Amino acid sequence: QAGFRGIIVPDLPLEEIHNLEQDCAKAQIELILLVAPNTSEERMIKILQKSQGCVYLISSTGVTGMQFGPDHNIKEKIRVIQKNPQISLIVGFGISSREDIQLVESWGVDGIVMGSSFVRKLFESSTHEDLQSFQNYCHYVKESFLRKKA
């Protein structure tokens, strides 16, 4: 058992997902498709139609690990995606603080992605005390997001 239900493959154009989509189906792993801030509504609809159940909305343009600063049209993208109740919506890119988590949570999303934040915290964890701090950070993130879900 793999222990996860889906994968995110950055920079994979919709037009090139066929082979990976088939491999994921065989392995019973969901291919999570991405919607960027500059994705047109027409293309977003195509992505939603191909989605296997979850879409990752990138909150802003830029490079990974930057400060959180959601794009001006993020709420409109969320509105379009949420017209499809069978699709779970996760949002990520630059999310690192409790305030970031609470803002994204207020948009009614199903989950968040905090890749660079976790990698940075883990990289800083070279001693037992540091690992305890990383564990505390993981609990802090979980509690920040789940507090409102309960």
Image: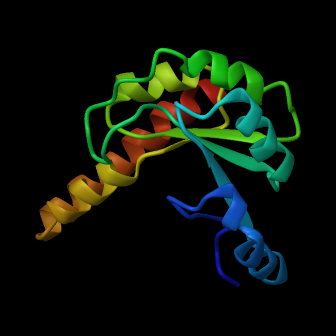
Number of marks in the image? Answer: 0
Residue 105 in sight in this render: yes
Residue at 38%, 50% in the rendered image: 138
Residue 77: where, in percent of width, then height?
A: 65, 24
Left or right: 72, with 136 as reference point:
right
Vertical arrangement, residue 78 with respect to residue 11, above or below: above
Left or right: 77, with 124 as reference point:
right
**Res 14 → quadrant:** bottom right
Scheme by which the image is coloured: rainbow
Q: Quadrant of the C terminus?
A: top right
Left or right: 59, with 95 as reference point:
right
For the residue pair 82 and 145, the one nearer the viewer reads as: 82
Residue at 80%, 43% in the rendered image: 46
Vertical arrangement, residue 83 with respect to residue 62, above or below: above
Residue at 61%, 58% in the rendered image: 13
Q: Quadrant of the N terminus?
A: bottom right
Residue 150 in sight in this render: no
Residue 63: where, in percent of width, then height?
A: 30, 45
Residue 2: where, in percent of width, then height?
A: 65, 81
Residue 51: where, in percent of width, then height?
A: 79, 51
Left or right: 123, with 118 as reference point:
left
Residue at 70%, 76% in the rendered image: 20
**Res 68 → quadrant:** top left
